[in-house]
Image (tube, rainbow, N blue to C red):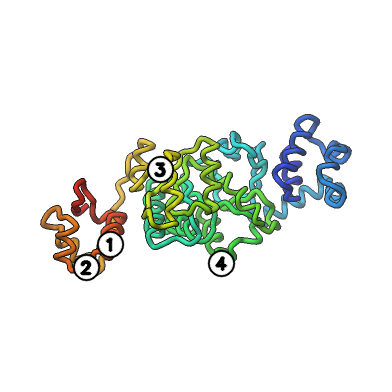
Amino acid sequence: MKRKILIYLSSFNLSISKFKKIYDLLEEGEYSLDYLKNNSEIKNVLKDELYSKFIENCNEKYIENYIKNLSSQDVKVVTIFDEEFPEKLLGIDDCPLVLYCKGNISLLKEQGIAIVGTRTPTNYGKIITEKFSTFLAENGFVIISGLAYGIDSISHRSCLKVNGKTIAVLGGGFNYIYPSEHESLAREIAEKGLIVSEYSPSYKSTKYSFPQRNRIIAGLSEGVLITEAGLKSGTIHTKDFALDYGKDIFAVPGNVTSSFSDLPNEIIKTAQGECVVSPQNILDYYHLNCKNIPKKVVQLSFEEEILINLLKNGEKDLEFLAENSKIPLGKLNGMLLTMEIRNLITRLPGGVYSIK
């Protein structure tokens, strides 16, 4: 009956504080439908209109039909009383009491890295996010993110491309995927990974529900990787939750003149997290060995081929590369950075470059 009562309460999509208040009352009293109906304090929490609806449907038949209907939609409900509930979430503040799930719920207990950031990444942000997500997925990490535009969707898609495991934590119910453009992505994740929400399928997300879902993203992960985000980005909520929960934080440094790299650069400057310039750094941090993954065929542009050919004869500095490639210096700097991120070349001490 305990789990059924929690599932019933979750169907009202209460705020975290209201849900917790009722949960605390149940812990102090007893888990029974009669107790729910006759407790005046619960009435004070729910207020008149919601309480009337609550009383009307507070019976075992209604609850069983609700659960049966969820099952018909391939929705599995995991409560804090279930073995499948991830222990990682039990220790966090405002732990969700119920999780609605579609997909492989065993992923809730696997080792995961959250990858989060801006909804409008630069080309630099797109490249490094794809690189980190792909590599970490290939090396066994579950990639966790929030299905949003930008860094989130790139993380999920990059993971799926290499048949990796990914979890999308939603800010609303399954019937109202946001953004709607990601409905097909959500379906693919449900088929190959897992989508999760603390809200019932009929709940429409609000501006308040997204920051709250970020605590679940942080809570499910071993660590949070921020590839690109501004100081006013919603990503800061995930970072703060991760700090509060004692999670590892990883930040990819970016151009100091780009506002899109302000948050990761600030994290590095203030020593709130680890500076990572390669996904291998994260494997090293956890003392894990890289799996023997066949190298992919790399497509090079005409100018990239010129640079690779120049470096085949040994280490070269920026001045040599600029003079012999005839590539304008501003463009050359950007190309070298991108090629370094793609693991094509390495920048060595003294400002010289070599082939990876």
Residue 315 visible: yes
Mark 4 or mark 1: which comes first in sequence?
4
Closer to the eye: label 4 or 2: 2
Image coordinates of residue 225 in percent, x first then y, are 44, 47
Residue 204, quarter of the rendered image = bottom right
Between the residue at mark 4 and the residue at mark 1, the CA separation in whole angstroms equals 32 Å
Badge 3 amino acid? Lys
Say which element carries label 3. helix
Mark 2 or mark 1: which comes first in sequence?
2
Tags 4 and 3 touching, CB below 8 Å: no
Between the residue at mark 4 and the residue at mark 3, the CA separation in whole angstroms equals 36 Å
Closer to the eye: label 4 or 1: 1
Badge 1 amino acid? Met
Q: Which residue is mark 3?
A: 269
Tell me the crowding category of disc 2: few under 14, some 14 to 19, or many 20 or more residues within 10 angstroms, Cα based: some
Q: Which residue is mark 2?
A: 327
Tags 2 and 1 touching, CB below 8 Å: yes
Badge 2 amino acid? Ile
Tags 4 and 1 touching, CB below 8 Å: no
**What residue is drawn where x is 45% and y is 41%?**
249
Q: Which residue is mark 1?
A: 335
Between the residue at mark 1 and the residue at mark 3, the CA separation in whole angstroms equals 25 Å
Badge 4 amino acid? Glu
Say which element carries label 2. loop
Please give the count of numbered marks on the rendered protein: 4
Between the residue at mark 2 and the residue at mark 1, the CA separation in whole angstroms equals 10 Å
Image coordinates of residue 85 in percent, x first then y, are 60, 39
Q: Which residue is mark 4?
A: 181
Tell me the crowding category of disc 3: few under 14, some 14 to 19, or many 20 or more residues within 10 angstroms, Cα based: few
Specify whether 1 is left or right of 333. right
Mark 1 or mark 3: which comes first in sequence?
3
Closer to the eye: label 1 or 3: 3
